Amino acid sequence: GLCQKATFLISAAKVEQCPDDIGYEVAFAGRSNAGKSSAINVLTRANLARTSKTPGRTQLINFFALDNERRFVDLPGYGYAKVPLPLKEHWKKHLDAYLSTRKSLVGIFLMMDIRHPLTDFDKVLLEWADTSNLPVHILLTKADKLTFGVAKNTLLKVQQQLNSYHNTTISVQLFSAVKRDGLTDAYSILRQWLHF
Ligand code: GDP
């Protein structure tokens, strides 16, 4: 399997602590509570992302190895109201540094709760990716919370709103960690990006 043997590598507080910048890595981003950890866990068939949720690690960039040259990167969830402002500033600088320097970063998986898609911060991230020519694949998570019709409509609306980004490829799909729906589409993107 694609990501079955994923293992925790390291939590980085600074860009200098990141693993060697070789091979390929996919970063997972999203607003806190969007379902990022659940998605990573389902995709890796492991409980990896729990590591990222242990107190003290939520503001860190957590690296998981799929093999010697491929990694998943769990970025800190953004928009978490309880984080004090100075920490938010630190987080932003940290994340900016990671996103703008990492050569092995081949794309971003962006998790958005299907009931609250395209928040301001999602748009900031999409702008950045568009400017940097980095592909983004969006998982509209918790699709099981809506009827299929409403979910499909939301998918279409989000797709329309993505038409304003012209420089890079942005794709979007329905996803449910609970129902394990959307895995095939997600793996097909991962296989492409990670050269599996
Ligand atoms: P994170 O903060 O982005 O890592 O979000 P989590 O993965 O911890 O999920 C936040 C909450 O949403 C938890 O209570 C999860 O159980 C729930 N959740 C995540 N994915 C799904 C899903 O696909 N369906 C449903 N119904 N709930 C989900």
Image: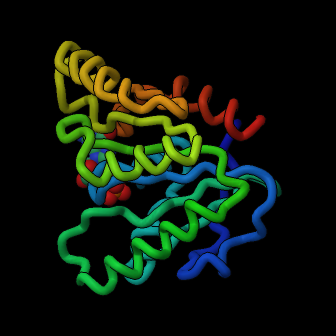
Asked if residue 76 is positioned above or below residue 144 in the image, the reply reads: below
Toward which corner of the image does residue 195 lie, by quadrant?
Answer: top right
Asked if residue 73 is positioned above or below residue 138 in the image, the reply reads: below
Residue 166 visible to an observer of this rendering = yes
Q: How many marks?
A: 0
Q: From the viewer's side, name the closer residue of 113 and 105.
A: 105
Image coords of residue 68 (percent x, y): 82, 57
> Measuring 17% from the left and 19% from the top, which residue is drawn there?
150
Image coords of residue 70 (percent x, y): 74, 51
Q: From the viewer's side, name the closer residue of 97 and 115.
A: 97
For the C terminus, which image quadrant? top right
Of all residues, the one furthest to the top in this rendering is 149
> Measuring 30% from the left and 50% from the top, which residue is drawn there?
34
Q: Relative to 80, is 193 on the left or the right?
A: right
Q: How is the image coloured?
A: rainbow
Q: From the viewer's side, name the closer residue of 63 and 101.
A: 101
Q: From the viewer's side, name the closer residue of 185 and 6.
A: 185
Of all residues, the one furthest to the bottom in this rendering is 86
Image coords of residue 46 (percent x, y): 55, 52
